[in-house]
Amino acid sequence: MKQPDAKPEILARRDEIIAGLRAILPERAVIDEAISLKPYETDALTAYRAIPLAVVLPEDESQVVAVMKLCAAGGIRVVPRGAGTSLSGGALPMEDAIVVGMMRMNRILEINTADRYAVVQPGVTNLGITAAVQDSGYFYAPDPSSQLACMIGGNVAMNSGGAHCLKYGVTANNLLGVRLVTIEGEILEIGGKHADSAGYDWLGLITGSEGQLGILTEITVRILHAPEGARAMLAGFAANETAGQCVDAIISSGIIPVALEFMDRPAIHACEDFAHAGYPLDAQALLIIEVEGSPDEQTDMLRRIREVCDRFHPLSIRVSESPEESAAIWKGRKAAFGAIGRISPDYFCMDGVIPTSRLGEVLRRIGEMSDSYGLAVANIFHAGDGNLHPLIMYNANDPISFAKAEAFGAAILTLCVEAGGCLTGEHGVGIEKRDLMQVQFSPADLAQMRRIKSAFDPAWLLNPAKVFPLPP
Amino acid sequence: MAVKSGEGLPAASINSEVFCFFFSKKKFFLKQFFFEKKNQKTFETYTGARLIRPQNETELAEAVRDTTGPLLIQGNGTKASMLRPVQAADTLSTSALSGITLYSPNELVMSARAGTPLAEIEATLAERGQQMIAEPSHLFGEDQTLGGLIATNLSGPRRISGGALRDHVLGVRAVNGSGEILKFGGRVLKNVTGLDLSKLLTGSFGTLAVLTEITFKVLPASEAVGTLVVHGQDAISAVATMSAALGSPFSVTAAAYLPDEKKTLLRIEEFATSVAYRTEKLSAQLGGSEILGTEASQSLWRDIRDCTFLPPAEALWRISAPPSAAPAILHAGQALGLTGMLDWGGGLIWLSGPASTHTHDALCHAATQAGAVWWLMRGPEPFRAAVAVVPPEPPALAALRQRIQQSFDPRGILNPLKLLAA
C-alpha cells in the first residue's frame, strides 16, 4: 500500500499552520503534541499508520467551516474522522494532513416521533441514537457491529450496514437529510425532514462518499418503532454448501427474516469460546436466523423457517426461548472480530459481496487459497444479502505473513468481483481496496467518479489518496 | 430547432378542452395519453421531430456522440407532461432497448434494459410471487418503461415502509453526454464500492446520462393484504392516526387519507394470520371499524398509487413534506380551489386543479414554508415552461449542480432544462 509523498512545503509551514488553527479555534480544540497525536495515527485497519500534522476537534459547525476555509486557502489536506472504527482505513491520516475529529459534536438536536425522525450531530454514536429514542419505543435501524463506538457521521460517510439491514436497509435507506461543509467552507443543506427530495439525489451521492466530498455537521435519520419482539434461532449444518442452499430456500419460500447470518466452522469455534452462546461445535456451518413480531407471529414464522431448514438435514436446530438467549446468540456474532483477535495476533476483515447463489463455490475457493497462502481464515457472512466477511489471520510483526495476508485479501476480493459481486458491501473502499478499483470499474467509470470528486473538491484536499487508485 | 416557450400554445389549449370531455377517472389517463401520442406532431417543436431509436447500447452511445444539438430523452414518452418541456429537435428513445436480462428470484434481483415495459417486469415478477418494492406509480398509464420510471423515481404507497425506487436500484448502465458507456453499482444487494452514482442517476430525469440497463432489488409479495379504514376524520386527525399507526409495532406498509370521503386508510401486508392479528390490534388502538380483505385492498391501493381519486384537471402537483405539515399544505391547496389527497402517512400530498400561475405560486410558497418540496407533475406546456416546476436551489447547490452536470454532459445536450430554467 503506497501513499503519496507528503508535500514538503506544507510540512515546512507546520508551525504557521498550527498557529492559524489556534487563531480560529478554542485552545482545547487543537492537538499538535506528538504524544497526543499518536492515538490518531490509525483506525480499525491498524496495519497502516501515519502521524498527522495536527488534529482539530471542532465543537460546532462554524469551527468546521473555519478549518475548511483555512485548509482550502493553504492547500492543506484534510482527513475527517469519527470514532476511528473504519475497517478500510477511511480515517488513516497523512503526515501533511489535518485530522478533523468530530467526536465533540455529539449532541442530539431534535427527536420527533410523530414525523419519525431524529436530528443529530455527527459525533453521536450509532447506539446513542437508539438510546435517545428507545423510551418512546423507537430505534435507529442500521446496526454495524461497532455500533457501541462508531459514530453516525462515519456511518453516513461509509454507508454502513449491519446484521439487520436485510430487512431495514443500510444507512442510505435510513437518512432524510444532512448538512455538509465543503472544502471551500460552504454549507450545503441536503434533504430535510421529508421522504423524497426534488432535484438530484444529493443525499444518495454523499452517503458512502467516504469523507471525500465534505464534512457532515448535522444528520437527520429516520427512526422506526420497534417490533413487538424478536427471536433468534440457530441451525447447524454439515457443509457450507448445504447451509447456503438453505438460505436460498428460505428466501425463495417468501420469508425475509430480519437477519440471516452465516458462520463457518473456525468462526463458530472462535465466537463460542469467546461468548459462550451455545453455538453447535460439531457443525461446519451455522445460520443465525431472527424473526420479529408478536410471540405468536414469531412462533409461526420460526415454524415455517424450521420446515425449510429440515429439508437440508440440519445437525441441530435451537430456537431461543428467552430474550436473554437471543441476546447471547447475538453477542457471539457481534463479538466475532474480538473473538478472532483472541486467537490470532492480527487479522484483516474482508467485506466482499457475492451473488448468494455462488456461496458454496466461493467459500470453497477461499478455503483453497487459505491453504496455498498458509494463512487461516474464518468466514462470517450476512447470508441474506451475500456480504462476506472473511477474517484473514496473520502476524503483523512478520513482514512475510503481512505481505501474504494483503495478497490473500486482494485475491478474495477479486474472486468476489469475478463471481459477479463487488469489493465492499459496507466497510468502504478506503485505502484498503483502493488499488483494486480497476478490477470492478472501467477507466471511464472511474474517470466519471473522479470528475464528481473534482466538482466538490477541485484540489483533492479532502481525504485524498483513498477510494481512487493513485495516478501512476 | 429550438423555439421559444410560447409557441406551443394552440396544442395546449386543445389539450385543456380534452380535460373537459373525459370525466371517467381511469379512462381519463388513457385518453390523455393517446391524445398526446397521436398529436405528437403538434408538439414537435418541443418534443423533437426526429425520433432516434437505437437498437442497442452501442448504437445509443454512437447517437449521443454524433448528435450536434440537444436531445429529448425518453422511453415511451408517457411522462412528457411532467416538469419542464424540453426544447430539442431530436428525440432519443430507449424504447428499443428492451428485455429482462437477469432474474434470480432467490437472490431477490432483476436486471432489465431501460426500454423494457414496466408491465412486462411486473408480470414476470408476479409469476414468481415477487414484486417491485416501491410499488411504482402507474399515474402516467400502462405504457411506461423501466428507464422512464427510474429516471423519475416515482414510488408508490409502499415508499413509506419499503423505501423509494432509488433505495432499490442496485446498479445501472448508462451513456453520458459524451457518449461514454458507464457502469455503476452492480447486481448484489449490498455495495458501497465507489461513489453511488446509481442513486445520483435515479431521479435525474435523463439530464446527466441516458440509462440503458437497470438492476434492482425485488421482494416476495405478501401472502395477504388488509386495510383498516377509519371513517370521518379531518386531515389533522387523519395524520395523527397515520402517525400513530406508522409509529406502532405492527409494520404498517402504507397509510393514506382521502379528504373528500373522510377515509383514513392503513395497510398491512403479511402472512394471512398476521394481517388478521395486526389489523385487529390497530383497529382496537385507533378506532377503525371497517377492514378490507386482500382483493379489495389491492384494488384500493392501486387507485391510491395512481391518484385515480383526484378528478381530471389541467395541473397536478406532488408535494413531499414532513407528515405533520400535511394538513396545512392540503388546506392551502383546498383554499386555492384544488382537490387533494394524502399518501405516505401525510408525507406525500397530491393536489390537482386548474393550471394558474397564481395558484402554483401560492401553493408552492405554502409548501416551502412548511418545510416541503414540490414537483409540477402535469400541466399545459406553456404553463410548465413559464413556472418553476421544482423548488429553486440555494446558490451553493446550484453551482455544484452545474459542475456535476458539466462532468456528465459537457455539451449540455441531455434533456436540457428539464428540471430548472436557465
Image: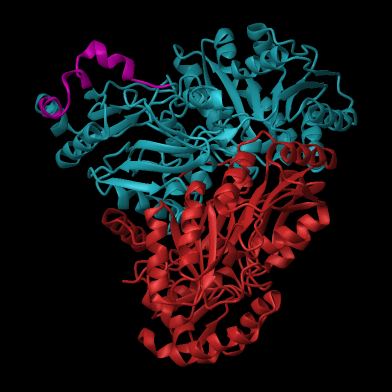
Above or below: residue A10 compared with residue B106:
above
Give the x, y percent position of residue A150: 45, 24
Position of residue A122 in the picture relative to residue B30 (left or right): left
Q: Which residues are magenta?
A: A19-43
**In which quadrant of the rendered view does residue A313 lie?**
top right
Position of residue B233 in the picture relative to residue A219 (left or right): right
Give the x, y percent position of residue B188: 63, 44
Q: Is residue B127 visible?
A: no
- What kind of colouring is applied to the model shown? by chain
Above or below: residue B414 compared with residue A105:
below
Give the x, y percent position of residue A194: 48, 48
Colour of the chain lettered B: red
The foreground one among A422 and A129 is A129
The foreground one among A468 and B316 is B316
The foreground one among B86 and A429 is B86
Q: Quadrant of the N terminus of chain A?
A: top left
Is A177 magenta? The answer is no
Position of residue A292 in the picture relative to residue B89 (left or right): right
Is A27 magenta? The answer is yes
**In which quadrant of the rendered view does residue A434 lie?**
top left
Identify the residue at horizontal 48%, vertical 45% (top origin). A438
- Specify the principal SS of the magenta part: helix
Q: Quadrant of the C terminus of chain A?
A: top left
Give the x, y percent position of residue A273: 66, 6
What chain is colored cyan?
A
The foreground one among A413 and B393 is B393
